[in-house]
Amino acid sequence: MYKLFRNAFIFILIVSFIIAFSGSYASLSMDNLAYVLAIGIDTSDENKLEVTFEFSTTASASETGSSSKTTPIINSVKASSLSNAINLMNSYMGKQLNMSHCKIIVFSEEIAYQGISDEIYTLINDTQVRPSANILISKCSAKYFIKQTKPELEGLISKYYEILTNSSKYTGYIPDSTIGNFFNNIICKSCNPSAILCGTNQTDMANYASQNSEKDLSIKASETQLEGQNNTESIGTAIFRDDRLVGELNAIETISLLTMRNEINRFLISVPDPIKKGNYLDIYLSLDAHPKIKVDTTTSSPYVKIQAKFSGRIYSMSDQSSYLSPEVLQAISNSCNSYLESTFSNYAYKTSREFQSDISGFGKYVSSNFFTTEESDNYKWLDNYKNAFFDIKVDTSVNSGMLITET
């Protein structure tokens, strides 16, 4: 009799578990989810938003699936808010949108100038949205940018979005701007947010105007002449004050930003050739250590002192000139010092005077000047940054190309 009751109890317990969890299993099944890879946010008429969702197919969602190219699904909806847009798309797709694989969030310049705090707060409040998702500001509509993004070397669009910012470590042309950092900088009292600047490239090669390497560093997104399957590019930085877009940085200015943040490994610059006047040398530089930054706040006009040290090697040289002698290498090093000091100074004053936005995070060095947080807050760094002065010193040691030896 005891065994009968025990077996009956175990049977009822098993059935109860099956009934209790069958519904949740069904709701969490992959068949009932629509995985979002990218979100594009544009303005629309009547104070509405147009939100574009890029969905993965089953093949492109799998990290271990085939490497063959897949075609993602792109749908758009107009709504009064981002939350309502997600809800409407849930209804349209017949599946629940899942944001856990969302890699990029693209805002058009138009909506960024108006302010994007509502959308940022909505996304950061969604537990599925990963803090590592990158924020991009598009010079064209976000919808058009997503539709034109067609990676050539990656079969999975999700993989392409995931490695999008890798090049910042060795080119310095874009910042690594995540939604987590963007949100933290919105609420920060000592810094301002920034994002990746993106757009569509110019493919009219017939009207290509020749440029030297110096001008190549002054480009931004939508200004390059590239020809290929992928019609989009990411070059430069979008500058924010609070949650509003206030300006842009080009490639060399973005290199300056990443140097101040110590977020760059190496980069290529073009400096005046001290041997052949009118020519330029391509130098590959590496930052030796974190720049030394000190901020004097004894007056209402902050004084920012920056010291940076680089090692470099020559990437381009003439076959008729000797770049191996110590005297010539020292002259090239001095040319790098002058060029970088001028470049960094122009960048610093541009963010201070023109944009009044401390995206470099100089304000983080201010707190050590005060005894209490209240004293630091009362200094109002973000308001005083527009009055800042900068003293920048650069020490560069340039060697000849690694594969070239004197004979």
Image (cartoon, rainbow, N blue to C red):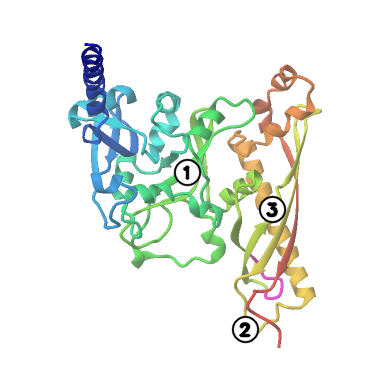
Q: Name the residue under label 1.
A: 196
The residue under the point 25% across, 18% down is 10
The residue under the point 63% across, 78% down is 403
Residue 72 makes an appearance in the image? no
The disc labelled 1 sits on which kind of residue? Ile
- In this picture, residue 274 sits left or right of residue 350: right
Q: Mark 3 points at which residue?
A: 342
Q: Quadrant of the C terminus?
A: bottom right
The disc labelled 2 sits on which kind of residue? Asp
Residue count near mark 1 (Cα–Cα under 10 Å), binned few <14, some 14–19, many ≥20: many
Range of residues picked out in magenta: 271-276
From the viewer's side, name the closer residue of 363 and 46.
363
Whole-angstrom CA distance, mark 2 to mark 3, is 29 Å
- In this picture, residue 133 sits left or right of residue 404: left
Residue 137, quarter of picture: top left
Q: Give the x, y percent position of residue 245.
A: 48, 34
